[in-house]
Every structure is written in structure tokens, then in C-alpha cells.
Amino acid sequence: MNKGQYTYIIRYGVAAAAVAALCDPVVWRTEAMPSVSDVWGYRAVAALVVLALTAVCLGRRLPRLHWADGVALFWWVYVSLNYVFVSPYPAAEAYGKAMALGVAYVALRLVIPFCGRAFTRLWWVGLCAAGGYELWTGFMQLAGREASRHHLFDVTGTFFNPGPYAIFVAVVLAVSVAWWYRYGEAFAGRGRWSRVGAWSVAAVAVFCFPVLVATWSRAAWVAVAVAAACLLWKAHRRMVLWGMGVAVCAGVSAYFLKQGSADGRLLMTMVAGRAWAGEWLCGHGLGGYAQAYGAAQEAFFAARPGSPLSVVAGSPEYAFNGVLGVGVEQGVLGAVPALVLGLWSLAVLCRRGEVSAYGWLVLLVSSLFSYPFALWPFLSLAVAWVALAVSLEAGTAEVRWWKRTAVWPVVAAGGLCVWHLSACTARRVEAYEEFRRVRGVQDVAFLEDYRKKYEDLKAYPDFLFTFGTALREAGRYNESNAMLRQGTRVSCDPVFYTLMGNNYRDLGAVAEAESAYRKAFGMLPGRMYPLYRLMKLYEAEGQMRKAEEMARQIIAFRPKVDSPAVREMKNEAKKLTKR
């Protein structure tokens, strides 16, 4: 084996390992709560660090610095300063992800130039291979051979919800169609293995369609339509224009098909924009989206009493618009670097004819209507696309041995930090699993266990609500309120305020209880229960005029979903007005 063949094998081996590390988070079981998949996300970054150190040792060239590297460094430094000086929220997990992604970016900036075209050739292959696995899982779920990850939906793949699953399938569809459109016929006319590869990509593209239909994801279809229009625009403009007309008609039909969901997304966009405007420069702080959104939604409905959008209001766990999510937490100083890196890298990849650029386009478009960038699999893909674009533009330069040696400690230190983060995440995952086993039991005996887990789980609303409820059952109302107040910092669900009102009522603090109930109703005017609690509070205190006013509101209230509990509350309100 000569030196050229040896170099060829090494580069393709490193490229294959890097692509595997980036695509592996997609095929793991993604959870909404802390899980082992988060631990392996950090370990995948650590694997990239090892590959980067290997590339530095074996190569004689290092990547040139580019102005985009400066933008990425500015963003990472700003996020660190935001976490330390601006954010009053428990955001250690969010900052840990930001640090790991920064290390992954540095590692990929070393790996991709070393691998050269080997990485770009394997990158879209890895995406299609991961997509094939997800398609197989989806078809097994549709056939009833495997269980869905969500009790309300038939198909979710390895994700916990059909939304992010549909987005990844759309990414794979865009990449496979773009490759076939540009190179498929040429490969289909070559040798046996070239034909097998070409028709395998075609099969992946074909099977993406029924799975996308089964997910009912409008965000994924919109992103696919945008990618198709960009792919066909130069050669088939007239067809694209006709397709845009059909897409508009289909969009109107889809709106009326799931109007409540569409109105809910519109409301979330308006409320998040209002929250961003409140702290437009530096944002509310890392991890502060939920509390800022809840306060903004309360102000929104206070200025618009009787708004029809109150029926579709909710308490979202994620920002359903990536730009607004970054803007609310990081302000303009964080949103501008994010937009610059995302749009610039997309333009570079499209200009250079990379077929994976259409997958990046799908991911960026879908992030305007969903929450892919809240999940590890999509964060890994996003860093890879940005690093690929910068590497293609920057190029490399031959350097002396001592410069390569100086890179080693910096990258190795980043790898050690990421490994430490994986250990911390593993500890949180273990604590959360222990909590899940006992959270249905409201017993004083578990209070000390909850207290020991507080430092690890203080950023998780379900833990804080369960802990607060257990303290209330034990009669520790003030301690319960302290825990519930912590929950209002990481969640915009008004149920925390409702339970705080119950605690204040039992403490005899009527004014505080009334304020908590009214705040709960102000955040979500579509829920009747806070009004019911107010009615019972006024009735118990002998304030019958206020109680009758609440009763009339309850009788006139139109609930989003009727239930026996709603009918019972309305019956009690009618009895009170008759008395």
C-alpha cells in the first residue's frame, strides 16, 4: 500500500467516524425529559474531539481562520456572559449544550478540512442512512409491529412526538431528492454498485412521502415545498410558480383542517415577539423563555379581554419559532449571530452545489414553526452544516509542527469539559429516573428524597410541581409556595399559581390567594378552574357579591373541551346564583 492509498483510507475513516458521531443522536430514543440520549449526545461531541486531535496529528495543514469563526466565537462568548451576568434562571443544562456545541464546532473545523471531499461525500450518505432507519421504524409503528412513542399518535419514529420526526424525514427527503435530481441518472447508468446506491436513494425518497402524510406535520410540508421550489427554480420556473399557487390553496385547506393548531402557533408567535420586545437587546437570560412567555401572554390577554385566541392559548414547553426563542432569551446580541451563521452557511452550500444544503434549508424553515433546535439530533446536524460551510470557504494552510502542537491542549481541554458535562448529565438522568418511580406517591416519607434531588432537578417543572404538592399535603404551605414559585421561573403553566392560591387560602392570606388565582386565569383565560377557585374563596369569606360575579362568569364560560369536571363546576355556579 503506497502513501496515497494510506492517506485515502485514513481520511475516509475519520470522515465516516465523524458522520456517525453526528448522525447517531438521530437514531437514539429522543426524550422530552433528561435521558440517556442526552448523555450520549455529549459523548458524541467527545468522540469528535478525539477525531480532531487525530486529524491534527496526522495532517500537516490547519484550517485558515474565517470571519464566520469570529461570529461563532462572539456568539459563544456572549452566551457565556448572558448565562453568568444576565440569566437569573436555572439554565445549567442549556449552557452545557451551548458549550458542547462550541467544542463540536471547533472539532469539526479541524476534522472537515483534514478529510476534504471525503466528508462531503459521506455526509449526505449518513443522513440518508439515518433516514432509512427512521423510515423503517415509522413503517413498523404504522403496521403495529412497534409501539409509538406517543399515546395520541401512531407514528413518531425514535422521537417522542411526530413533529420533530416529520422534520427529520423532511430533511432526508430533501437531500435524497436533490441528489437524485442532480446525479441519479448518471449513477444509475454505471456499474452494479452505483446502480444499487442510486436506486436505494430513490427508494428512501419515495418512502418518505407516506410517512410524512401519516405525521400530519404542516411545518415539514411547508419546508419541503420551499426546498423543492429552490431546487427547481432555475430550470423550471413556470412549474415552480404553478406549484406555488397549488401550495397556497393547499395551505388554506390545511389551515381550516387544523385551524385551532394554526391559530395557536400564531398566538405563540405574537406573544413571543411581545416578550422579546420587553428585553430586546440582551434578552431575559438563558433559560428564561418560559417565564417571559407567561408574563407576555398575561399582558396580551389583559390588553384584549374576550379575545377569541384565548381558546387556543396554552403553556408551551418550547419556543415554536427558533429565531424568537433565541431572541427572547439572548436578545438581538444572540439572534443576529444565529441568523448570520444560518443564512450565510445556507447560501455558501447552495452556491457550491452541495446536495445536503437542501436538508439544511428544510431544517431552517421548519424551525420557524416548530422546535427542532431544542433537541440534540438537530443541534448536531446544524453545527455540522455551519462548520462545513465555513471550512469550504476558509480553506487550509500548511503550518509548522509547533502550531499544530499548540492546538492540542485547547481542543483536549474542550473535550475534557464535555466529558465532565456528560457525567453531570448522567447524574441528573439517574436522579430523574428515581423521581419518576415515586412521583405518583404524595407521602411525607419521600420529602427528604425530593430535597436531595432538588439541586439536580430544579430546572424541571414536573419535579418542582410534584415536590410542591407533596409539601402541601404535609401541611408545609410556605415551603410548598417557595417550591412552586421556583416552578414559575421554568414553566409558564398557570397550575403553579393555582396551587399557590390554595396554599395561601389555607394560610388565611385571602388577598394573596385572590391574586394568585387571578394571575392563573390571566395567563390562560381559556381555563375555568381558577374562576371556580375564586368563587369558592369568596363564598367561604362571605363576599357573596363577588362570588355571584364569578358564578355568572363560570356559567357564561365556553370551555375548549367539555368534561364532567366542567359540568360539575357550572352546576355549582348555578346553585350559588339561585341561593
Image (cartoon, rainbow, N blue to C red):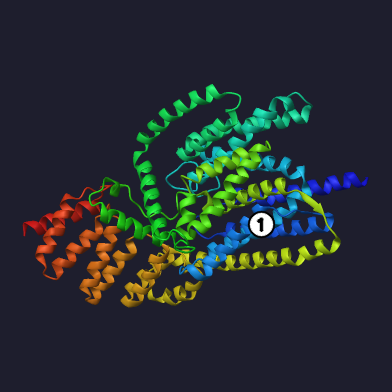
The quarter in which the C terminus is drawn is bottom left
| Amino acid type indicated by mark 1 | Ala
Q: Which residue is mark 1?
A: 104
Total tally of numbered discs in the picture: 1
The residue nearer to you, when weighing 49 against 423, is 49
Residue 122 sits in quarter: top right
Furthest residue in direction right, as rendered: 2
Residue 518: percent from the left, percent from the top? 24, 63
Residue 164: percent from left, percent from top: 51, 46
Q: Residues within 10 Å of mark 1 (few under 14, many from 20)?
A: many
**Foreground residue among 157 and 265:** 265
Identify which residue, 456 or 45, lies in the foreground: 45
Image quadrant in which the N terminus is located: top right
At x 30%, y 57%, the residue is: 299
The residue most toward the top is 238
Q: Position of residue 81 (x, y in %)?
A: 55, 67
Q: Is residue 415 above or below residue 134?
A: below
Residue 45: percent from the left, percent from the top? 66, 58
Residue at the image point whose x is 71% and y is 45% from the top: 392
Res. 39 in view: no
**Position of residue 516 in the picture relative to residue 413 (left or right):** left
- Which structural element holds mark 1? helix
Residue 55 in view of the camera: yes
Camera-side residue of 333 and 579: 333
Instruction: Judge left or right: residue 540 versus residue 267.
Output: left
Residue at the image point whose x is 45% and y is 49% from the top:
320
Figure quadrant of residue 466: bottom left
